[in-house]
Amino acid sequence: MNNTNSRPIRLGRISYTNAWPVFHHFDPTQLPFQTEIHSDLPATLNRKLRAGDIDMAAISSYAYGISADSYYLLPNLSVSSFGRVQSILLFLKSPLEQVLHGKIALTTASATSVNLLKIIMEKFYGGKPTYEDAEPVLEQMLENADAALLIGDHAIRASWTNHGYRVLDLGEVWNIWTGQWMTYALWAVHKETAHRYPEAIREIYEALIAGKSKSYDDMEPIVDKALRQIGGTAAYWQGYFGNLCHDFGDAQRSGLKLYFQYAKELGLIEGEPDIAELPLPYLLDNLSNRR
Ligand SMILES: C=C(O[C@@H]1C=C(C(=O)O)C=C[C@H]1O)C(=O)O
């Protein structure tokens, strides 16, 4: 155990419900060292991790892709779906044919999904829309645009309003065109932090994995919390969490590689990043040192 960290380990948690199955049971006050928790939207966490303002966070998979050299991934953690995701939604005010060459308002909360949308619009549908960043408020976004992209709880709440727009679920469109999983978020740690505080990183990692496992044993407390904090019905949340996957294995990796390949083809990313996990021997070594 490392009680001699010279400063708190700074951790980022995605504030949207999609990450709750990993974070709900994670209690940093139980760790034998100091932590500092940053609960933010994905785009903010992407920025803070990049800037070195935090050490480890759940971030957009796209943000991992553009900085993969500086980070290790925490094994077997992600936010992914095979098909419908229900919280990455394009709301169409105009017919799709018009949207393809029109203007799309993009939520400022996202990185993976805005690039997924570009892949879908340009590579799959052969369009060339213009894009404009916007605060995630549906009616405002659509005042000046043909369509609007929302993610996370903003998308969920908007999908419950009686808006009358046609809605595309980007997880579903990706899956129909590729037959693959889509991974939206990954857990990344700065390589430097991992080398400097291996014990602390291992303990955090174990706590996250244990928390995820507890959630998957019983999703009820998370469904209840979502009902209280966001609204909706228990059936909605059971379906929502049931469609998400928080593992990261060969199937999810293969979908993510394809996403990076397409992003590179469209010039959205420079090279195809290595998907490099925190080496297992690193974890095992530190585990055996402790015993
Ligand atoms: C499933 C979702 O995935 C999120 C989408 C992200 C993005 O588009 O950059 C980042 C983190 C994920 O938590 C969601 O927004 O609902």
Image (cartoon, grey):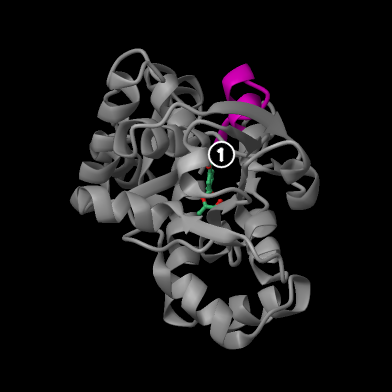
Residue at image coords 66%, 27%: 132
Taking 72 as reference, is 258 left or right? left
Q: Residue 279 in magenta?
A: no
Q: Secondary structure at mark 1?
A: strand
| Nearest to the observer: residue 23 or residue 45 | 45
| Nearest to the observer: residue 107 or residue 47 | 107
Q: Residue 51 in magenta?
A: yes
Residue 262, x across and y down, in percent: 28, 29
Question: Would the CB of label 1 be found within 8 Å of ligand 1?
Answer: no
State the extent of the magenta-drawn residues as a range.
45-57
The residue under label 1 is 57
What residue type is disc 1 on? Ala
Residue 84, x across and y down, in percent: 40, 63
| Nearest to the observer: residue 155 or residue 18 | 155
Residue at image coords 38%, 47%: 183
Which residue sits furthest top?
270
- Residue 148 visible at all: yes
Residue 47, x across and y down, in percent: 63, 25
| Nearest to the observer: residue 63 or residue 94 | 94
